[in-house]
């Protein structure tokens, strides 16, 4: 009988209630089911032995590129890539063409996602009109249209006075701000982290200060306004320190880190490979260690991919001219496991918590749980599956991965959204 | 392309540049013998190539920077440049590049380096094609990759690339089978300039190890400074970098150099002073307050020259802006070896071509 599944013999990990046991998980009519209430013969058995059965992963930072750039990615291709990566929901950034700063654009994205999306898509709305950092976007109308947060991601409001008004408005509306922290007068023209390697390579440096100035400014503004601040893709040791201190003071701030900032450093740019060019740039080894420490002590709440697909021809140019950004949906789970589980910084349940339960909680999204009655958004992970990253095999249209050729361990072998199988390896 | 096209042109170029340099004029006598290029029918004529370097076989297809070279490879190139000069001085001809095509792809303007590469290639018997930004399709939106692959499809064996973007030469080297020679990429490296600076110093002082070299100016944005630093360090020189803090960040200490934000204390120490060109855009970017202040702090004046040891060598990669980095008279004075650098440049580039051609002939057919 279709729609009735028994995921048999897996390690059921549900961080929302601390569950971690070998057993069977039942899915009926799109929801996690209690088998006691249903006839036993109706289950379609799926063998999950040796695997982890977990709530579906949730990525708070994805560029689906629609509307405007379907040659880079579409809602259809991006959500299929997400499903293959073990995600059941993604939060779409608003730096599309046009930018998602009007309710009708949000409506279009939601409609499109309903028709073509393999996983749930939660749109965000711009903070400022056209992401220009000059004038408030219609935040109230955007909330009514269904955005889950506000962000100018890829850009950052430079005017502190405007940012204060934005925060006041967002606080009033009860939605968080996802902040891309970049003071452009400091980062301006930079293409990689300012340090030894930028000096060796002759590439214009991007000082850590550019991120840290905005992290500190926004912490002060969040304290003043009561807005909920979520700092995107932290990349420097100083930012981790600022967020740690703010949390200790009780400021409503949360933070994310990308797998590539956990796994790589600026030395990776030695051959000028543009698949290592992203915003914010890869930091030093000291930055990377601070980010790992931030994850370990909870200063950094979660991991998000900042999946940013580009066409190959756009990336295959001189380093200065290449766009920022790398894809990440299909490698995030395994790269995170490589950086955090293999090194014993987190165990599997703790990693799943940072990839599923915590992101759901930060934005108040459904999911992140396997309790009976919850929507059956789940992933089956084979933690021992060894595979080699081959960007040509990605479901994403983007091939711009910094992990091409990496030998990784751990992969989603089945992803289910509302009881429907959307990915099976 | 018929070789007769190249003959007169090469002669003309030589005449213009040659008058200015001692080394150059010594080679003039030898030149006539190889103005007569062999015709295609005579391609079996034995040609002279440089003997293999005593430092061992050259084993690279490309020359992208000095950072990745071993000390022995750098010495091998300097020895080869001396060998080239001896050949030319003795009137023998070198046709290491006979039958090969060199494309000078200069996406960023340059006169000195472009002409130097052109002369070097022609003197070795290559066909040389000049492409600048104006004449290339890059202006029409063609990518660097496509431009280079088209040139390669037309038979380019060497691509000499000058480009404003750091890493452009690496980018090309990964995508073509021709030999790529970096003729300056952004603020990254300018390896043949680095080599010619080393050669100039070695010819004048007889060695590089232990020589005290000051490099003065906009270190941060200078590809010449980087190539000089790598080359000098590998060969055992001592380096002091001098410039304002905005153009000389402390990270340069990690390159194995001492830093000074003042010029005067360094001068009595220096056996060689390399002055770098100052780009005026840097003032607009807020890197220094005014040209006048820069000159007063870092310009080499007559009174500053008197603080230097009497036998000090003054060098400059060119083009010089008289009255900024260096007082006009000093550039032409007895301490200046600026034109020796230019002359060394042709010998060094011939040596680089010859070494790469050796690799090319060994491995080219199998590519």
Image: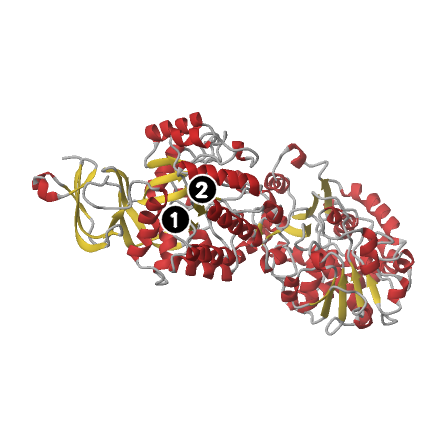
Residue at left offset 76%, top offset 58%: B217
Residue located farthest toward the top when viewing the structure as drawn: A104
Picture quadrant where residue A391 is located: top left
Residue located farthest toward the bottom when viewing the structure as drawn: B210
Q: Which residue is mark 1?
A: A331
Q: Using the numbered discs, state the Cα–Cα distance from disc 2 to disc 1 in whole angstroms.
A: 26 Å
Label 2 sits on a secondary structure element that is strand
Question: B88 or B209: which is nearer to us?
Answer: B209
The C terminus of chain A sits in image quarter? top left
Q: Can you say whether B138 is above or below B78 in the image?
A: above
Residue at left offset 34%, top offset 63%: A344
The N terminus of chain A sits in image quarter? top left
Read off the chain for label 1: A
Label 1 sits on a secondary structure element that is loop
What percent of the width, then of the height, locates residue B49? 72, 59
What percent of the width, then of the height, locates residue B337? 85, 62
Q: Can you say whether A356 is above or below B80 in the image?
A: above
Question: B240 or B90: which is nearer to us?
Answer: B240
Q: Count neighbours of disc 2 (C-alpha within 10 A) and say few if under 14, some if 14 to 19, many if 20 or more.
A: many
Would residue A159 be seen by someone viewing this image from the given angle? yes
- Circle nearer the N terminus (2, 1): 2
What percent of the width, then of the height, locates residue A392? 42, 43
Read off the chain for label 2: A
Picture quadrant where residue A109 is located: top left
Q: Which residue is mark 2?
A: A177
């Amino acid at each position: 009988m279709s729609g009735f599944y028994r995921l048999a013999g897996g390690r059921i990990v549900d961080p929302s209630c601390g569950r971690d046991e070998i057993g069977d998980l039942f899915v009926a009519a799109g929801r996690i089911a209690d088998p006691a209430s249903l006839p036993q013969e109706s289950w379609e058995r799926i063998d999950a032995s040796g695997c982890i059965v977990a709530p579906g992963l949730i990525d708070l930072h994805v560029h689906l590129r629609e509307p405007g750039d379907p040659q880079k990615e579409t809602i259809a291709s991006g959500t299929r890539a997400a499903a293959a990566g073990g995600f059941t929901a993604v939060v779409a950034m608003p730096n599309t063409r046009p930018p998602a700063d009007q309710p009708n654009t949000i409506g279009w994205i939601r409609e499109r996602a309903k028709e073509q999306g393999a996983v749930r898509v939660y749109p965000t709305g711009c903070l400022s009109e056209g992401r220009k950092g000059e004038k408030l976007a219609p935040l109230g109308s955007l909330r009514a249209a269904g955005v889950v947060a506000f962000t100018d991601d890829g850009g950052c409001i430079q005017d502190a006075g405007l940012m204060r008004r934005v925060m006041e408005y967002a606080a009033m509306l009860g939605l968080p701000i996802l902040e891309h922290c970049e003071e452009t007068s400091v980062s301006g023209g930079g293409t990689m982290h300012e340090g030894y390697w930028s000096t060796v390579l002759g590439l214009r440096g991007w000082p850590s200060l550019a991120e840290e100035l905005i992290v500190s400014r926004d912490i002060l503004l969040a304290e003043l306004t009561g807005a909920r601040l979520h700092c995107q893709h932290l990349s420097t040791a100083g930012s981790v320190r600022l967020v740690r201190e703010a949390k200790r003071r009780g400021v409503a701030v949360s933070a994310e880190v990308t797998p590539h900032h956990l796994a790589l450093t600026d030395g990776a740019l030695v051959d000028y490979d543009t698949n290592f060019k992203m915003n914010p740039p890869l930091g030093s080894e000291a930055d990377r260690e601070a980010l790992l420490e931030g994850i370990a002590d909870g200063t950094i709440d979660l991991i998000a991919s900042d999946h940013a697909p580009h066409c190959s021809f756009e990336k295959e140019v001189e380093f200065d001219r290449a766009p920022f950004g790398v894809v990440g949906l299909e490698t995030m789970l395994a790269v995170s496991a490589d950086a955090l589980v293999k090194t014993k910084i987190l165990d599997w349940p703790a990693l799943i918590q940072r990839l599923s339960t915590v992101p759901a909680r930060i934005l108040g999204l459904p999911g992140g749980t396997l309790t009976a009655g919850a929507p059956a958004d789940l992933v089956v992970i084979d933690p021992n599956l060894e595979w080699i990253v081959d960007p040509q095999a990605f479901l994403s249209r983007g091939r711009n991965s910094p992990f091409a050729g990496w030998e990784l361990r751990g992969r989603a072998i089945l992803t289910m959204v509302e009881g429907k199988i959307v990915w099976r390896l | 392309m018929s070789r007769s096209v190249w003959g007169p042109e090469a002669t003309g170029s030589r005449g213009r540049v040659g008058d200015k340099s001692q080394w150059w004029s010594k080679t003039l006598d030898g030149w006539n013998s190889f103005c007569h290029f062999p015709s295609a029918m005579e391609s079996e004529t034995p040609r002279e190539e440089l003997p293999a370097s005593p430092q061992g076989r050259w084993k690279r297809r490309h020359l992208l920077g000095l950072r990745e070279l071993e000390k022995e490879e750098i010495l091998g190139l300097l020895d080869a440049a001396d060998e080239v000069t001896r050949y030319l001085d003795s009137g023998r001809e070198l046709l290491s590049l006979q039958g090969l095509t060199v494309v000078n792809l200069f996406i960023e303007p340059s006169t000195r380096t472009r002409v130097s590469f052109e002369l070097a290639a022609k003197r070795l018997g290559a066909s040389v094609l000049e492409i600048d930004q104006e004449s290339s399709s890059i202006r029409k939106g063609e990518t660097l990759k496509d431009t280079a692959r088209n040139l390669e499809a037309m038979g380019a064996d060497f691509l000499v690339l000058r480009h404003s973007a750091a890493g452009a030469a690496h980018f090309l080297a990964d995508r073509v089978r021709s030999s790529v020679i970096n003729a300056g990429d952004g603020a990254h490296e300018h390896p043949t300039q680095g080599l010619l600076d080393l050669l100039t110093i070695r010819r004048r002082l007889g060695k590089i190890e232990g020589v005290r070299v000051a490099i003065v100016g906009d270190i941060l944005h200078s590809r010449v400074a980087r190539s000089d630093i790598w080359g000098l360090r590998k060969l055992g020189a001592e380096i002091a970098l001098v410039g304002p803090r905005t153009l000389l960040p402390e990270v340069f200490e990690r390159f194995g150099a001492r830093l000074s934000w003042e010029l005067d204390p360094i001068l009595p120490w220096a056996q060689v002073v390399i002055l770098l060109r100052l780009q005026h855009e840097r003032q607009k970017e807020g890197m220094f307050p005014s040209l006048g202040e820069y000159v007063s702090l870092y310009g080499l004046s007559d009174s500053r020259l008197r603080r230097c040891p009497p036998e000090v060598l003054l060098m400059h990669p060119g083009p010089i802006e008289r009255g900024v980095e260096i007082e006009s008279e000093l550039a032409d004075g007895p301490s200046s070896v600026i034109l020796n650098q230019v002359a060394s440049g042709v010998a060094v580039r011939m040596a680089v071509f010859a070494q790469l051609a050796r690799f090319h002939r060994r491995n080219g057919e199998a590519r």
